[in-house]
Every structure is written in structure tokens, then in C-alpha cells.
Image (cartoon, rainbow, N blue to C red):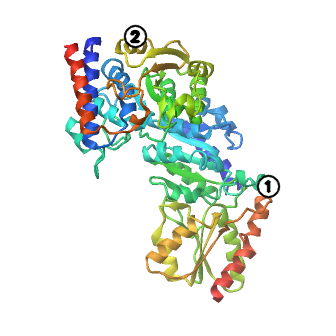
Amino acid sequence: MLSVPDLQRKSVQYRKDLLRLIKHAKAGHTGGDLSCLDILNVLYNRVLRVSPETFKSPDRDYYIQSKGHCAEALFVVLADRGFFPKSDLDTLNQYGSHYIGHPTRDVNGVEQNTGALGHGLAVGVGIALAGKIDRRDYRVFVLLGDGELAEGSNWEAAMTAAHYRLDNLVAIVDRNGLQITGSTEDVCQLAPLDQKFAAFGFEVRRCDGNDVTDLVRTLEEVPFRPGKPSLILAKTKKGKGVSFMENVAKWHHKVPSDDEYSQAMAELEAVEAALK
Amino acid sequence: MEPALANLEVFAATLLELARKDSDLLVVTSDSRGSAKLASFAKAAPGQIVEVGIAEQNLVGIAAGLAAAGKNVFAVSPACFLTARSLEQIKNDVCYSDRPVSVIGISAGVSYGALGTTHHSLHDFAVLRAVHNITIIAPADNFETREAIKAVANLPAPAYLRFGKKTMPHLPRALPGFELGKASLVRQGKDITFIACGETVAPVVAAADLLAADGIECRVISMHTIKPLDEATVLQAAAETRGVITVEEHSVNGGLGEACASLLLQSGAHPRFKIVGFPDDHTVTGSQSEIFPHYGIDGPGLAATAKKLMAV
């Protein structure tokens, strides 16, 4: 379990690992990876009761990444946590590799194959419901993109989560406000998401999804209310951590040029030096 | 012999028997427990039924999650909705993610009759044949239904099973037993072969009786497992009889017939061959028992098809 200062350093390391990976693979959802990376950091290094040794245990915590297109962020964190050798990621997107642009169970540490949007929450509801039936105390964390909340299946699952009083379910919305076309609010208005999830029966908390201190504080409080599923509206920046990528929709799945890569790494190294 | 029931009723009774022996068995329904004859199951095993409301995508996603946590899950809903609205959940959450969910399509084909096309499932074999990692089953009678339910409950892989709600006669069997992926020989014969599945096997037997009166001996095969197809039985029929007719309560596109045609042609066999099913057209209105004869799926219609094929 990492301290907050260690988590802060880890977030910078993950950003560097991520950009190196995307640059090497020549593909990746750079913007969304960067927005959700702090959430993944805090989950895997502080909150989730799961490790490579306990990954098959029936009592482990589950993590489902519904926004599957940000697989690179998940792979970077899983590799760092020892689920597989970091060198495996050299094969990302290569012919015959298990490491593809979306999470699959062929990768150790991945719970569910995702990629099509609007699927993760219902699967998480099923796992959480099984936990209640079997009286196990594991928790289920589902990471949702904000853009994918236009998929109606999310709301079907949300209704069921509240109906079965699944307080072992924690949904986290990576609220970066951008999708491939532009602002989520211009594409098809999502706000007010807090009120919508509350109306669907979730206990809602807002937090800064790029601030590990706030993430730790919020995630360590779950469940927010007994008998209700928890929803964390994590305000994030798409492209977080690299000045010229932040809040710029075109970085949804853009790969940095050599110059952009050098500049991004220099920025991250400067932050890293300041944290030492 | 026990009284003939609808396959649906046999399904519900068999599931309750299995649930009593396996506390991890769960049934997930989408406001469909009444249609699925599962009301008595819900009363007898209230802790083993999960209701999700009228939300089929949710039904399959939750079923996949329950299976991920070790449950033996039956996801039950009308075949029409289950295999269209939640196709992506079947493809990704169940098949691609390798979750051993039994997807149960009730009131399949044109069982809902006059309720019309929204409630018909004449596409399910076609779409699921093209999805990897799912066994597709359409049992013909009560025996096959009971055995198929027991088989999928023990199958550590995804399965789709569909049946109707009409009382089905017990079918004769030339050979005993039931095995997924192995066709049932209903009747031995040397002149022409009918390969059918689900509720069309009964009218095929009626046709075989009519043809027998004219001295034509039909081989009748219940191909209860559409995928994986029992290829040896199909090829043997093509080699040993003078023609093959496939019959299904499904579109002629993409179902059992095309599976057999593909196998035969690619194996170098070129028997006289006919696919009987639903044409690529708006389905005629009426009850199931009116719709079947309209498309020649009854004793006289199938007998006529057989004679025409043999006369070619």
C-alpha cells in the first residue's frame, strides 16, 4: 500500500511508461489513458484487495474497466504491480500478441473482456450480486467513461444495482468531459450526472480524479451509505499531465510525434524531479 | 410414458430439479418468469432466481458477471429479444469473455404466432452461428429438452438453447441416448433424408408416415445441435440416401440448412438438396399452426417437397 507522496511519484512514472508504450506501439487512446491513470494508480496501489497471488481467489476485489479503449493505462499499472513482465508490453498490438487495444482475459490481471461501451457496469452488477448471495465481502469497482454513459445499458444496470442494494459496487466515472467528437455536453448532454445517478439510487460523491489525495480520501470511504451502490464522479482532464494534451479532444487517440514525445517526457521528468 | 408437455414446461421442471442439487445454479429473468413457466421455480427456490426487469442487455451482462463469480447461470428471455437486443452482450460478455452462461430463448421461432415479427425469432441460428464459442441447440421433444438442459448445466462453456411453447409429441427413436453435437436418429430409412430441428421434427415424422404409405422410406434426423454440427451424420445421409431435405423454424438464410449445404458442398458431396424454412419475406400472419403449413412445414407439405425433390 503506497503513501500519498509515493502515489504522486507513481502517477508520474505511469505517465512516462504510458507514453513510452503508446509511442512504441504507435497506437493508443492517449487522452483517456492520461485522464484515468491516477484513478487506476490509487485503486491498484492503495484500494483494491487483489494481487497476482490472489487474482484467482474468490474473495478478491474485482476491477472492471468498462472504458476498455484505455487498455494501455490498465496494462501499465498491471505490469507495474507484477501481473506480468513489463517486457510483455513490447508486443502491444503486434501480430499474435495477447496485448491488444482493449482489455482481454488473456492478459493476467484482467477480469473481463471489454471494448464495446456500456458493458462493464452490468457485468459488475452480476459479480457484486454473486458476492451478496454468497456473503463474501469483496468489492467490485467499475470504471466508466463519461462518453459511454450515452449507452442505455448503463442505466439498466444502474437501476438493478440500486434495486439489489449493492453497496459492494463502486462505479467511478472518469469525467473528463470530452469524447472523440468534442465536448460531451455538445455531443449529447450528460449533466447533471450526479443528480442522474442519485435518482437511479446511487450514493454519489464528487472528487478530483487527478488528485491522488482526494482519490484516496474518497475511495477509502466506500461504501458511502450502507445498502446503496456508490458512484464517484471523478473530475479529470483528458490528456492530464502533458500541457499540450490537456483538454484537447484530438488527443483522444493521437500518437505523439518525436518532438511531442520529447517535450512530454521532459515535462514529466521535471515534475518527477520536483517530487523527489 | 409421461404425458406430452410443451418443451417449455419440461425446461422449467428440469431446471428446478437441477437447482435443488446445485445451490450455485441461478436463473436470471427479464419479467419473463411467467412466460418461461418459472413461477413455480420462483416459489420453490426463491433464492435462485434473479429478476432484472424488462432489460435484456442487462440480463445477459449480469448473467455474465454472475458466471464470472462462479455461478451456474441460466439467462432466460424470449428468443426474439435475447438474440437481437442483447446480441452484443452474448458475443462479448459471454462468448468472447468465455463465461459458461446458458442463454435460454423461450417461445422461439414463430411460437408467438399472431403477435407478429417483433416477437418472432427467425434469425437466431444465423447470428449465433457466426459468433465463436457458443453451442446452439434446438431440442425437438420433451426428452431432448430434458437431456439438453441437463447437458448445458454441466457444460463449462456458453450455450444457446431455444424452444417453443406448444405441446410436443414424444418422438420415436431409432437409437437411444442424447449427446450434444451428436444427432438423434428418429427413424431409419434409405430413400430420402430429412434433417430437422426443434419443433419441425414432429411434422417431418408426419411426412415420413405419409411417404411410407407410398413406399418411400425416409430417414429422419433430429439435428438438435446446430453448432457444432454433427458432420458425420449429414455426410452419411448424403451418401446413403437419394436426397437431403433440411427443415427448420428459422429463415432459410444462415440456419441449419445452410450449415448442411456448406458442409456438403465443401466435402464434395452433391446430393439432391432442399432447404425448407422461412423465406426472406415478411412472415405471413397467423398462429404457429397456421404459419407452418403456409410455408410447407407440415406432413403434406413436406411429403410433397420430398416427392418433388426425388422426381428431379
Q: How many numbered discs sit on the rendered protein?
A: 2
**Comparing marks 1 and 2, which lies closer to the viewer?**
2
Q: Could you say whether the residue bearing mark 1 is in a helix, strand or loop?
A: helix
Relative to residue B243, is residue A189 depicted above or below?
Answer: above
The circle drawn on residue B90 is none
Residue placed most toward the observer, B7 or A215: A215
Question: Pointer 1 indicates a residue of which chain?
Answer: B
Asked if the residue under mark 2 is in contact with the one under mark 1, i.e. CB atoms within 8 Å, the reply is no
Find the distance from the CA under tag 1 to the CA under tag 2. Answer: 58 Å
Disc 1 and disc 2 on one polypeptide chain: no
Q: Residues within 10 Å of mark 2 (few under 14, many from 20)?
A: few
- Amino acid residing under circle 2: Arg
Q: Could you say whether the residue bearing mark 2 is in a helix, strand or loop?
A: helix
From the top left corner, tell me how far across and down residue A157 is, in percent: 57, 31
Name the residue beneath numbered marker 2.
A217
Relative to residue A108, is residue B217 depicted above or below?
Answer: below
Quarter of the image that includes the N terminus of chain A: top left
Residue in view at x 26 percent, y 12 percent? A5
Quarter of the image that includes the C terminus of chain A: top left
Name the residue beneath numbered marker 1.
B114
Taking the image as shown, residue A36 lies to the left or right of residue A24, namely: right
Q: Residues within 10 Å of mark 1 (few under 14, many from 20)?
A: some
In which image quadrant can residue B267 be found?
bottom left
Residue in view at x 41 percent, y 40 percent? A113
